[in-house]
Image: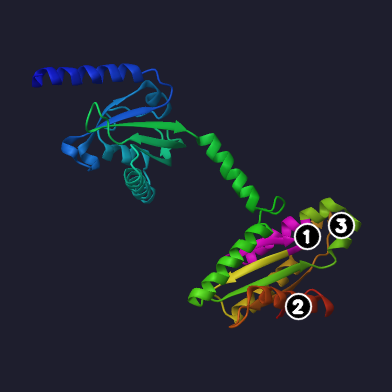
Amino acid sequence: MTFRMEAEIVEASKEVLARSLEFVPIPILISESLLGSSSPSRRFHRYLNQAFIEQIGYTLQQMPNMEAWYRLAYPDPDYRRQVERDWSQAVREALAQGRNLAEMTAQVCCANGERRWFIVTAQLKADLLPGWNIVTFRDVHDLKCMMDANERLSRTDFLTGLDNRREATRHLDAAWLRWELGGEPFSILLCDLDHFKQVNDVYGHASGDQALISVAGVLRQACPRAKLSRWGGEEFLVLLTGGDVEMTDVIAQRACDRVRRKGFVWEGQPLPLTMSVGYATIRPEQTLTSLLQCADAALYLAKERGRNQALAG
């Protein structure tokens, strides 16, 4: 077979491939690497189907090569570098496992400015057309958003929007590990609303819910760098990392004072609300369990001594 005949067969194959992909309902992009180059600027785009134009929006003129595609699809430089690293890793893993497909999930900036999640899959080697890569984009935006929302709900208290106890426990375990490995100190505050049952009994549970929401807002302002969670019922947990005992005392007293001075109102009536706090800073030879017990004992003592105060454990 002559070189000319081979070239004609290749061109015919390209034409057949393009026609067969035109009506596929998912975006498809075909690129060609010149002389086996892996450089994005040397990988040129040869074809994209109608679904690509309709769903992602760019044309071959706008993105003639892979470098131009990366700039358009991932305009944030940091995220673009992350995508490039993740894609390189996906390709290495695919080749190491003998697979001809590499895949990753990425958030693509479409031509209309909308950012949507796609599963990007690329055929690494085309037997018929060496140097060609066939890339498909499966739109999973709605599914990804729903999964992310469910993940947030699993970590968040539905009423206050703070972390729930499960997420707080995860943060506590991470803080404990940093303490064990690197000696980074941390403190915890256990905050409990005083006479909260009376609020519910006198004003109703709706007022109690609103009080919890309001106190969560006060704690966000009083402890802006802390990890905040609803530990349970009317109890909140504040995790402070990197601070010392004196700073923890300042923050605990400030949180207690701000709740007292907030001036809660329910249906036009003043809602008297104060908070007791027990706090403790990690010490050598102390376990996470004993730290929590120490803060809890201080909270109990603050309640016993008249409430509306913060005590160290």
Residue 200's disc number: 3
Amino acid at the residue labelled 1: Gly
x%, y% of residue 282? 61, 78
Furthest-right residue in view? 202
In this rendering, would 313 be left or right of 64?
right
**Residue found 44% across the figure and 36% down from its top:** 118
Which mark's residue is nearer the viewer, 3 or 1?
Answer: 1
Sequence-wise first label, 1 or 2:
1
Q: Which image quadrant is residue 248 in? A: bottom right
3D distance between C-alphas at marks 1 and 2: 18 Å
| Residue tagged 1 | 233
Amino acid at the residue labelled 3: Asn
* Residue 25 falls within the magenta-colored stretch: no
Mark 3 lies on a secondary structure that is helix
Where's the N terminus, which quadrant? top left
3D distance between C-alphas at marks 2 and 3: 25 Å
**266 or 105: nearer the viewer:** 105
Sequence-wise first label, 3 or 1:
3
| Residue tagged 2 | 297
Amino acid at the residue labelled 2: Ala
Sequence-wise first label, 2 or 3:
3
**Residue found 61% across the figure and 74% down from its top:** 187
Q: How is the image coloured?
A: rainbow
Mark 1 lies on a secondary structure that is loop
3D distance between C-alphas at marks 3 and 1: 12 Å
**Residue found 76% across the figure and 75% down from its top:** 299
How many other residues sit within 10 Å of disc 2, few (<14), some (14-19) or many (≥20)? some
x%, y% of residue 123? 33, 34
The magenta segment: 211-235
